[in-house]
Image: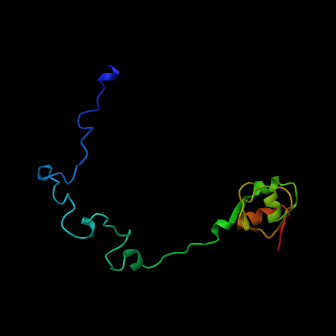
Amino acid sequence: MQLNTIKPGAGAKHAKRRVGRGIGSGLGKTAGRGHKGQKSRSGGFHKVGFEGGQMPLHRRLPKRGFKSLTKHLTVEVRLDELSKLPVDEIDLLTLAQAGLLPNGAKAAKVIASGTVERALTLRGISATAGARAAIEAAGGRFAE
């Protein structure tokens, strides 16, 4: 095999469709666009979901569910991350200084991942039921 003899497989390449090039091409005259109407014209365009003035499907169907606008403002913190902190009294400022809170975070929630061995005091931080039980079992408490 030489590089100058390499060819694509049979049927792998085919000519680009050339519309509007006469009756013999099979796509002459209307060029596959049918007769009349907005989509047959050049520049004929309508918005996605537009149904000719009829109420669009996405507006006919009812709204469903709930989308929280503050979900991305709360950060999850693991128990083992808390146990690595050098202080016993933890609040949002402490977590931010330790690099556990990204910019824009307004709240933190402790999740039960890992263990905590010492008594910690958490101020203004919420926790899951399992994390709360683990912190209180180690002698810690939640101060509001």
Q: Residue 33 placed where, x, y %?
A: 22, 61
Q: Is residue 30 visible?
A: yes
Count of numbered labels shown in the rendering: 0
Question: In this image, 46 relative to 21: left or right?
Answer: right
Question: In this image, 63 relative to 10: left or right?
Answer: right
Q: Residue 11 placed where, x, y %?
A: 23, 37
The vertical placement of 81 against 12, above or below, is below
- What's the residue at 64%, 65% (across, down)? 72
In terms of depth relative to the viewer, which is nearer, 96 or 11? 11
In terms of depth relative to the viewer, which is nearer, 51 or 16? 16
- Image quadrant occupied by the C terminus: bottom right
- Image quadrant occupied by the N terminus: top left
The way the protein has been coloured in the rendering is rainbow
- What's the residue at 56%, 72% (across, down)? 67
Res. 100 image quadrant: bottom right
The vertical placement of 24 against 73, above or below, is above
- What's the residue at 33%, 80% (across, down)? 54
Q: Residue 138 placed where, x, y %?
A: 83, 61
Res. 97 image quadrant: bottom right
In terms of depth relative to the viewer, which is nearer, 11 or 85? 11
Q: Residue furthest top?
A: 1
Q: Is residue 115 visible?
A: no
The vertical placement of 98 against 12, above or below, is below
- What's the residue at 73%, 68% (across, down)? 107
Question: In this image, 66 relative to 25: left or right?
Answer: right
In terms of depth relative to the viewer, which is nearer, 21 or 17? 21
Q: Residue furthest left?
A: 24
